[in-house]
Image (tube, rainbow, N blue to C red):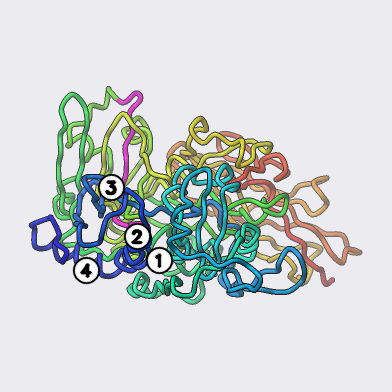
Amino acid sequence: MYQCSETNKTRETFCDIYFEMSLKKILLGTVFLRNRYIGLSSVSTITDKKYRFDESEGFLFRTKGKILTAAVFSSVLIGAAVNEQIKDKNVKSQSNDVVIEAGEKLPDLPTYTAEEVSKHGDKNSFWVTYKHGVYDVTKFLPSHPGGEQIMNAGGLSIEPFWNVYGMHKTPEIYKLLESYRIGNLHDDDVIDHSDDELWVKEPVRDNRLIVKTAKPFNAEIPAKYQIKFFDTPNELFYVRQHMPVPELDADDHRLKVTVKGSKIRTEEFSLRDLDKFRRVTTRAALMCAGNRRSEMNEVKPVKGIGWMGGAISNAVWGGVYLRDVLLYSGVDPEDTKGKHVIFTGADIDATGVNFSTSIPLDMAMNPSSGILLATTMNGHPLPPDHGRPLRVVVPGAPAVRSVKWLQSITVSEDESPSHWHQKDYRAFNPSKTWETADFATAPPVYSLPVTSAICDPADGDVISVKNGAVQVRGYAYSGGGAKIVRVDVSADGGRSWWEARELQADAAPPQQHYGWTLWTASVPVATQQKEVELWAKATDSNFNTQPERFNDIWNIRGILSNAYHRIKIKLVH
């Protein structure tokens, strides 16, 4: 019934397998099974569909030459702080204290058929369904963090996409959804949107990781392991995923490099082809831009995964310089102004769109940037969770720029058009709201500010005082190649500071220093003190120091969360 338009046997097989594994359940089970109800011009019958694999775009569905997508009702941006332990999908109704489940069938509400819901899919009247629930979210549209992407979900179920973007499944989001409840979906139209097939081939993970979301998998490294190892063991390196982990064969994998200009030049490399370039290693920490978001969230709620301090890890990466590959592919190092390098991964979202982001070309061509096309991590082939068989490593930048499962590089005058580049990882001042924030005019984040965290003791610990002092250990890091030159700790609200005397760092010089620094400080405490709040702040080689308060750097996405780290501990003398 379906044919893969790519004639290459390997790709045809891969196309068939991938379709069966994920898109079939997501798209066929939600859109096409309802074709008998939906009269939208952009949707035709299932028998008219063909799909293909395009190296630059991934899997796309075509209807009369146009791309058919069913976009996510609410992007990952709307996800509030999430913990894997939060599995209770019950929320309180706004009218009383009765606990209900989001999307459950409620009495005394009108019933709508799927056909009726499908007629409400424009800005004037925008309905969606979730399980048995029918919701009129028209008034929510201007507040949607994902912008126009929501429009493709009009008149359909949001459940399959929330199965992919598991961070939506929080009490806060369920409560928000229920506030737009207008009725029940007819029993005959309720479809099982089980997503087991999508995640059946996920890698095995270390049970010491602190899981924030299971689908997609996001987990941080416990603080005690951050300071135990200077180079984080691969199995303990924090994990940040946006979609399911793709299965790629290193022998068959190809990297396509396209350089756009007066002429378009294209090169294709196998992993063996990349070996003709000089191989190098770089020690670099990778940190999610949302690391320590949970602390900023205490000032005022923000959108995103509730990372504590464990969304950063350190490793030695092996591969070849991106700059060398771009030079070989015809990039002129003197003609970089206004140009960008787009990285596209093999991971695909629920709409059939590949993950993608970009960096400025002058950043990519700067010899001191040290950007790698990496194949190894701490001397071993990349693990699946960290990009096997090929990823970009952009040292000193938010980890989102270090695209995993890399399948294409495009040099262009345009930035990446993807949602993750255009509508995420941009910062705003504390007064901006989702209604007033203009992502188009906000600059993308390509570097990270100086930060630090206390890893031992932990908040709430009971600590024995020895020789009138407590031992405090943690990490510090700064982006853009800056090196940590000092870490200070205070036990009296900032009236006095004690410098960490032990700093463990890579030997790389400032401007080319991309690893983290582990530190130890001995902090005196008064004999009468029973409890103390410890503050930590770091200073880098540019003499930038962490700000004191999160109030001053708060932003709607909760990124670049680098104010003083503070913990409270109890003392035993």
Residue type beneath disc 2: Met
Segment colored magenta: 336-350
Local packing at callout 3 (Cα closer than 10 Å; few below 14, some 14-19, many 20+) is few
Residue at the image point whose x is 47% and y is 49% from the top: 150
At mark 4, the secondary structure is helix
Q: Which mark is residue 377?
A: 2
Residue at the image point whose x is 26% and y is 27% from the top: 333
Residue at the image point whose x is 15% and y is 53% from the top: 270
Which secondary structure dominates the residues rendered in magenta? strand
At mark 3, the secondary structure is strand
Q: Earlier in the sequence, mark 3 or mark 2?
A: 3
Residue 62 on image: x %, y %: 23, 51
Local packing at callout 2 (Cα closer than 10 Å; few below 14, some 14-19, many 20+) is many
Quadrant housing the N terminus: bottom left
Give the Cα distance between marks 3 and 2: 37 Å
Residue at numbered disc 3: 67
2 vs 4, front mark: 4
Give the Cα distance between marks 1 and 2: 7 Å
Residue at numbered disc 4: 17
Does the magenta segment cover residue 471?
no
4 vs 1, front mark: 4
Q: Which mark is residue 28?
A: none
3 vs 1, front mark: 3
